[in-house]
Image: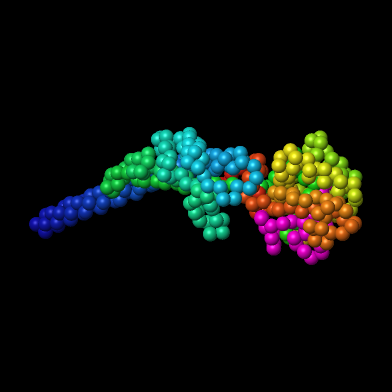
């Protein structure tokens, strides 16, 4: 009798435990299924996010390149330029086309015009300020959400009550300071010290010669580019530039150029002829010139290039010429070269990443 009661109690206990195990298994399976759904759908969303980032990068670069082409078509300083409606349309069109070359989660990316903005990027604070007045950057946001292209449908997220997920990506591309001059870009045998830019900048007068010791405004000199630094080579380069028979070499940031610090009447005659030729042919001599490292205001050796500037050469003369007195320190034994450093000039392709000396390239780089 006692044995029968024991067996009956044991069966009841086993049935109770089986029921508890079944409940535990069901709860565990639901949790595992939820985790699997979360992992699967998050992975899918992350892939889509990377695809959107590719689209944003391509669109921002294309939009900024269109901006560079607008500026590049207008030689000289662009200070104060405001984008026209046609300019903005070109930028939006370029960005939209580049974005549509990409897909995110199987959907071709459509970039809304409202998600394409021109402005300026602050690399220190990493902030973008929208503007249409001389912007140097284009920011693009791509989406898979209710605003554009639709949210991404989840695979198993319905288990957790999540039927879709929204994803966005942002990229900013900028026109950066020039870092390289291609063969023939440099059209004057001058260089300017970065020391000048510690006190002065674009819009200010630079005096290449004569040099006044300790005065950053007269910190510059003559260069023979990659040739030996002597009067004959500087004169030959000036003559060749005036005649259109000389092509200046390519040079980039980190490269070196040879500088000459002597005086020669024949050099000044050739430089004056070059100045007059440029003014006659182009209305002005906007010289693309290297900025060299350090504070040597009378350079006479190889100097390292740290960037490039554009200078409107306003006077070139030699001893005894009318107007020679316009240069500080000028006397009967020295020549005189003066100019105004230009702001916001966009020159050719120009590379990206040189020092900020007022001259920018037209091929953008990603900054965000």
| Residue 29 at x, y percent in the picture | 29, 48
Residue located farthest toward the bottom when viewing the structure as drawn? 214
Q: Outermost residue, left direction? A: 1
Residue 281 percent location from the top left of the image: 74, 38
Which residue is outermost to the front? 322
Q: How many marks?
A: 0
Nearer the observer, 354 or 348: 348
Q: Which residue is pictured at 80% across the width and 58% down the height?
A: 327
Q: Quadrant of residue 205?
A: bottom right
Place of residue 305 in the rendered image (x, y in percent of width and height, measured from the top left):
75, 51
Q: For the point 74% across and 49% down, which residue is it? A: 313
Position of residue 23 in the picture relative to residue 141 (left or right): left
Left or right, residue 81 beside residue 288: left
Q: Kindly tell me whether residue 361 is visible in this rendering.
A: no
User: Is residue 236 visible to us here?
Assistant: yes
Vertical comparison of 216 with 25: above or below = below
Q: Up-down: is 217 above or below 141?
A: below
Residue 217 among those drawn in magenta:
yes
222 relative to 348 in the view: left or right: right
Q: Residue at x 90, y 49 (%)?
A: 265
Name the quadrant of the N terminus. bottom left
Does 78 lie within the magenta span? no
User: What's the colour scheme?
Assistant: rainbow
Q: Residue at x 77, y 53 (%)?
A: 338
Q: Nearer the viewer, residue 114 or 162?
A: 114
Magenta stretch, residue numbers? 197-224
């Amino acid at each position: 009798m006692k044995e029968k009661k024991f067996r009956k109690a044991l069966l009841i206990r086993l049935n109770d435990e089986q029921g508890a195990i079944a409940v535990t298994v069901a709860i565990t399976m639901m949790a595992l299924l939820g985790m699997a759904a979360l992992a699967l759908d998050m992975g899918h969303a992350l892939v889509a996010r990377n695809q959107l980032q590719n689209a944003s990068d391509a669109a921002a670069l294309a939009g900024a390149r269109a901006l560079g082409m607008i500026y590049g078509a207008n030689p000289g300083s662009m200070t104060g330029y405001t984008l026209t409606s046609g300019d903005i349309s070109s930028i939006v069109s370029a960005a939209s086309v580049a974005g549509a070359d990409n897909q995110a989660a199987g959907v071709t990316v459509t970039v809304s015009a409202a998600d394409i903005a021109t402005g300026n990027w602050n690399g220190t604070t990493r902030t973008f300020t929208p503007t249409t007045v001389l912007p140097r950057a284009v920011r693009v946001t791509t989406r898979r959400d209710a605003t554009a292209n639709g949210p991404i449908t989840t695979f198993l997220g319905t288990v957790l009550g999540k039927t879709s997920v929204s994803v966005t990506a942002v990229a900013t591309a900028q026109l950066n300071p020039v870092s390289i001059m291609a063969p023939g870009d440099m059209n004057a045998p001058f260089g300017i010290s970065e020391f000048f830019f510690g006190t002065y900048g674009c819009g200010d007068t630079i005096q290449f010669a004569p040099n006044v010791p300790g005065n950053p405004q007269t910190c510059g000199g003559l260069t023979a580019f990659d040739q030996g630094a002597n009067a004959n080579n500087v004169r030959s380069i000036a003559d060749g530039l005036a005649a259109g028979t000389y092509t200046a070499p390519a040079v980039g940031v980190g490269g070196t150029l040879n500088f000459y610090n002597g005086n020669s009447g024949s050099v000044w005659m050739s430089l004056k002829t070059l100045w007059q030729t440029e003014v006659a042919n182009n209305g002005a001599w906007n010289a693309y010139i290297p900025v060299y490292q350090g504070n040597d205001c009378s350079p006479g050796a190889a100097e390292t290039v740290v960037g490039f500037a554009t200078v409107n050469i306003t006077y070139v003369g030699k001893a005894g010429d009318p107007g020679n007195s316009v240069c500080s320190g000028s006397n009967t034994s020295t020549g005189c070269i003066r100019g105004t450093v230009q702001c916001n000039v966009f020159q050719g392709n120009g590379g990206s990443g040189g020092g900020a000396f007022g001259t920018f390239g037209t091929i953008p780089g990603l900054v965000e």
